Image (cartoon, rainbow, N blue to C red):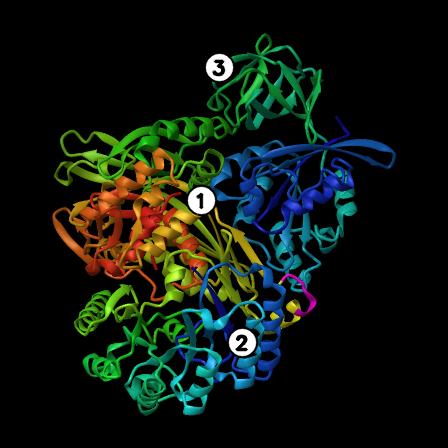
Amino acid sequence: MKNIRNFCIIAHIDHGKSTLADRLLQSTNTISEREMKDQALDDMDIERERGITIKSHAIQMDYVHLGQPYKLNLIDTPGHVDFSYEVSRSIAACEGALLIVDASQGIEAQTISNLYLAIENDLEIIPILNKMDLPGAMPEEVTDQIIDLIGCSEEDVIQASGKTGLGIDDILERIISKIPAPKGSDDTPLQAMIFDSVFNPFRGIIAYFRVFGGVIKKGQEVKFFNTGKTYHADEIGVLKMDLNPKNELGSGDVGYIISGVKKANEVKVGDTITSNTNPCEKAIKGFEDVKPMVFAGIYPVETDDYEELRNSMEKLQLNDASLVFEPESSAALGFGFRCGFLGMLHMEIIQERLEREFNMTVITTVPNVSYSVFLKKDLNEIIVNNPSELPEPSKVEWIEEPYIKAQVITKTDYVGAVMNLCIEKRGELSNQVYLTQDRVELSFQMPLSEIVFDFYDRLKSVSRGYASFDYSPTGYKRSDLIKLDILLNAEQVDALSALVHRSNAFTLGKKICLKLKELIPRQQFEIPIQAAIGAKIVARETIKALRKDVTAKCYGGDITRKRKLLEKQKAGKKRMRQVGRVEVPQEAFLAVLKLD
Amino acid sequence: MSGIYIHIPFCKQACHYCDFHFSTSLKSKTTLVNYITKEIELRKKEFPNNINSLYLGGGTPSLLTNNELSIIFNSLKQVIDISSLKEVTIEVNPEDVNREKLNFLKSIGVNRLSIGVQSTNDKVLKWMNRIHDKQQVLLSLKLAKEYEFENFSIDFIYGTPPFLNRDYEKEISTLIEHLPSHISSYHLTIEKGTYFGHLENKKELENIEDQKSEQEFLWLSKRLESSGYNHYEISNFSLAGKQSFHNSNYWKQLPYIGFGPGAHSFLKGKRRWNVSNNAQYIKRVGTKESYFEDEKLSSLDLVNETIMLGLRTKDGFDLDKIYSNLSRNKQKILNTKIQKLIQEDLLTLKENNIFMNKKKWLLSEYAARELFTV
């Protein structure tokens, strides 16, 4: 056990985490040149293309230092706020963390909140200044930021580059000398924490765990503490580039278990694995049942594809237990599902995976948060996850909506603009801290629903990209909310309804109408777009009728290009949904997310 | 029937609306002409059968000197008999038309002129950055008549912004007084990469409203038809028997062979296009490197072309011909779409021919997309 080191990596998106991890794998010969591809740990195409990590991964590296063989377990974690619970469990599985900061960018909000989490868990932090090869690297300035933040000395900060390999040996040496070996004993009852799971079509669910005490053996009966279910440990082992079966794993080890579990939701991240015959007394603390934060309807573009969509979602759920859904129907869109997501990125990812992995073209409706509605009659509380299910306003005593603590880190130049945006989004400033002379951390109390509505893009644009953002939920608060409906060609489209704050309703209605006008192609008749609160129309735009759709010339040199263009346009039209007489493109349903 | 196209990629100056391939540097004109003849020589064996038309387009073919024209025509004579062709057309700009030029063109066998008039309003001509003015237009038309080009066509542009205050009746009546046998009347298109495209990006120019386009289109159609012109393609009108053979070949998917930078060919079910850069063309034809790309059309590609091109013409397309290339299932889908468009009053089905209704002709690409088979 004294030769095991368990560590994770804390980094902001694009700060070079995956590339640096790739170098560690190469230096320890965990992966051969031949097997090497970029972002080796990220399995999904979508992860590689977007340069993000969605799932946690783990890998064991063998490394000899001063004649001693070491097992280094790297747990690669997602970097986005949507997956902060998964990150927290990965952190809890480690004794140390590499803090990777882009030398040309400096520290970002996401990094800080994960860093605090690591410090709370008593992890040893190894600060690394990455991308030192970039001409824009500002080592002195960013080193100062790191020193301010974790109170280390200048010499502790390793200068590195995932691209050139600078500092990689230093990092490996520091992992061994600084990060403590795991504590715990093989003699206590088995206590292992699940930090992630993946679905394998042949083997079922493979759960990743870290042993905190005792020994897990192949063939033994295990019990999952929080679900109470018992399983047979068909196979256990450690994670190299492939699964590497073992007969037993002891305290401090990181490994996997295959136990015939078929459903992802039986394996909960943070749950404790123990022995069925000699169970531990307490579960490992920190377990939470993750709840979806954002809800939206997902509908097939072709109504006939409903059953196929259900199949696809079920398969996706095997791999992603945090996706929840139940059937619902919409007057405008027919049959579909109301889905719960961890956040906006999670929602985008699910939509994209449905298209990529299952070839399902879907329409996602306007997302919303979960509201608590208190009825006049008996002050009974009902949960509303879909604006069109909101009871008649006359029956509602009040509505509560979820609030968050939002943290924004930005440059001093943009403090004013960021504050204006957050205040416009009904935020209240609760704290303001200067991290360095020109970097400020702002904290706000804000309704979560305001983050759902075009917040990220606006934050990016008001700060010219120099703002990072993180949030955590703080509970429900009473709000003056009303339902804003959208009418196309005089017919209400329930999939476009949203619950909004009364003070915003008019402006928002106007903006949504304008955006829809831009997104809905002209058709052979005039289409009025209206925003309404109850029976009252608060905004209107008109899409003029299409009378000309042809180019003037089509001669010898134009034929091929023209045919291809028309074919492409026709393919694009497949993503349209007929709502009444109007054909509405897929992206129009998400129009409210990208208002100007 | 089939045709030959030769692209002359030179202009004295760029018109603000034009996105065709051309260069305003005339230095390499003679060199390029020589390389065109080299291409003709290289592709001697590819000439299609039953050629009925030769067409020199551009750019501005009237910028070629008599000597340069001779080089091209002599080279073609090695392969075909020009005097046997029904239609030998050259595009000319009004400012290039003079007695000497017309004499020469007649002598080498040109029997049809396509004159780039565009407008008879000096303010409009200037706005488009045309070189010529109204006087030159009238003179060129007079000379075309005098030199007994029984066939001459004029290009006209409508759909221009309202601030130009055009009097279309005045322009059209001035033009048809000279009895052109053919009129191509194009709605202004603001193309990317042109000066007008640039103005559009800066929000200083925008397309006119659809309703106005439709109104001008229908007015022109009625006006010209009442003067004896047959509106046989969205943008083309002709006196009886004077339809352009050359362009009709394109719309009927008949073969053509094209020479010069950016020229397209359609031979044996393959569409091909030459590199559209003068220097690259000269270099690659010279070294016999690949100077073109091509693409074999699938039977579905051909069906979609038939639909797209057919809907642009008055006669439309032959439904049986299309059906014979489609599976049962695809026939059924197409039939449903056709019924829908007939109901929307876009199409007419008559004796197995499908064609656009005049009133909705400007929606022919909308209709084509609907009918395309995928």
From the image, which quarter does the N terminus of chain A lie in? top right
Label of residue A228 in the image: 3
Which chain letter matches label 1?
B
Residue B81, image x, y percentages: 51, 70
Q: Do the residues labelled 2 and 3 touch (CB within 8 Å)?
A: no
Label of residue B217 in the image: none
Residue A136, image x, y percentages: 65, 64
Magenta highlight range: B286-290
From the image, which quarter does the C terminus of chain A lie in? bottom left
Q: Which of the 4 image quarters holds residue A404?
A: top left
**Element carrying mark 2:** helix
Label of residue B73 in the image: 2
Please, what is the three-letter code of the amino acid marked with disc 2? Phe
Q: Which of the 4 image quarters holds residue B38?
A: bottom right
Q: Earlier in the sequence, mark 1 or mark 2?
A: 2
What residue occupies the far top of the structure in this picture?
A: A277
Please, what is the three-letter code of the amino acid marked with disc 3? Gly
Report, in whole angstroms, how far the alpha carbon at label 1 lies from the one at label 2. Answer: 36 Å
Assess disc 2: are there few (<14), some (14-19) or many (≥20) residues with their C-alpha within 10 Å of its C-alpha: some
Rendered residue at 46%/30% (across/down): A316
* For discs 1 and 2, the disc positioned in front in the rendered view: 2
**Element carrying mark 1:** helix
Rendered residue at 51%/52% (across/down): B268
Say whether residue A82 is left or right of residue A36.
Answer: left
Residue A542, image x, y percentages: 20, 58
Rendered residue at 57%/76% (across/down): B74
Which chain letter matches label 3?
A
Assess disc 3: are there few (<14), some (14-19) or many (≥20) residues with their C-alpha within 10 Å of its C-alpha: few
Q: Can residue B323 be seen by looking at this rendering?
A: yes
A217 vs B168, nearest the viewer: B168
Query: Same chain for the residues at labels 1 and 2, yes or no?
Result: yes
